[in-house]
Amino acid sequence: MSEKNNQNFLFKSKDWRENEWNGMPEYIQNKLVPFRVIKMHFKNQEDVDAFEKLIGQKIHAGYNTYWYPKLNLKTSSNKRYADKK
């Protein structure tokens, strides 16, 4: 069987996927994109300090992305599903 036919088989045959994922909980990915992004400029450190107090977050020199209100990002890379067998 050629490589092209092997790939077509993977997409046309649903049986093996349905059997593999049968009984697994549904995963819902919540929308995590911002509503609006604003680029800001500050004249001096005093202005940065005032803005930090206003938003209640520490602004670091090496990090330029912040959420308001502060967003506690969750990671899913440390999670996995396992069979109880």
Image (spheres, helix red, strand yellow):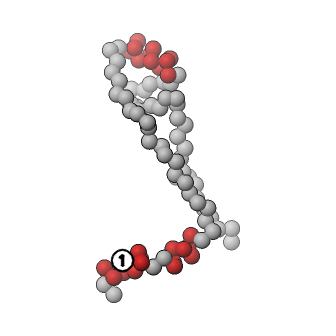
- In the depicted structure, whether residue 53 falls above or below residue 77: above
What residue appears at the point 52 percent right and 29 percent down from the top-left corner?
Answer: 69
Residue placed under numbered mark 1 in the picture? 7
Residue neighbourhood size for the residue with mark 1, other residues' Cα within 10 Å, grouped as few (<14), some (14–19), many (≥20): few
Q: Position of residue 18 (x, y in %)?
A: 54, 74
Q: Residue furthest front?
A: 35
Q: Residue furthest right?
A: 84
What residue appears at the point 48 percent right and 43 percent down from the top-left corner?
Answer: 32
What residue appears at the point 34 percent right and 18 percent down from the top-left corner?
Answer: 42
Q: Position of residue 64 (x, y in %)?
A: 39, 31
Q: Quadrant of the N terminus?
A: bottom left
Q: Quadrant of residue 82?
A: bottom right
Q: Position of residue 63 (x, y in %)?
A: 40, 31
- In the depicted structure, whether residue 22 falls above or below residue 77: below
Considering depth in this image, is 51 or 78 the residue closer to the camera? 51
What residue appears at the point 58 percent right and 55 percent down from the top-left corner?
Answer: 79
Residue type beneath disc 1: Gln
Considering depth in this image, is 69 or 83 the residue closer to the camera? 69
- In the depicted structure, whether residue 28 falls above or below residue 36: below
Secondary structure beneath dot 1 equals helix
Q: Position of residue 11 (x, y in %)?
A: 41, 75
Using residue 23 as the reference point, say whether residue 41 is left or right of it.
left
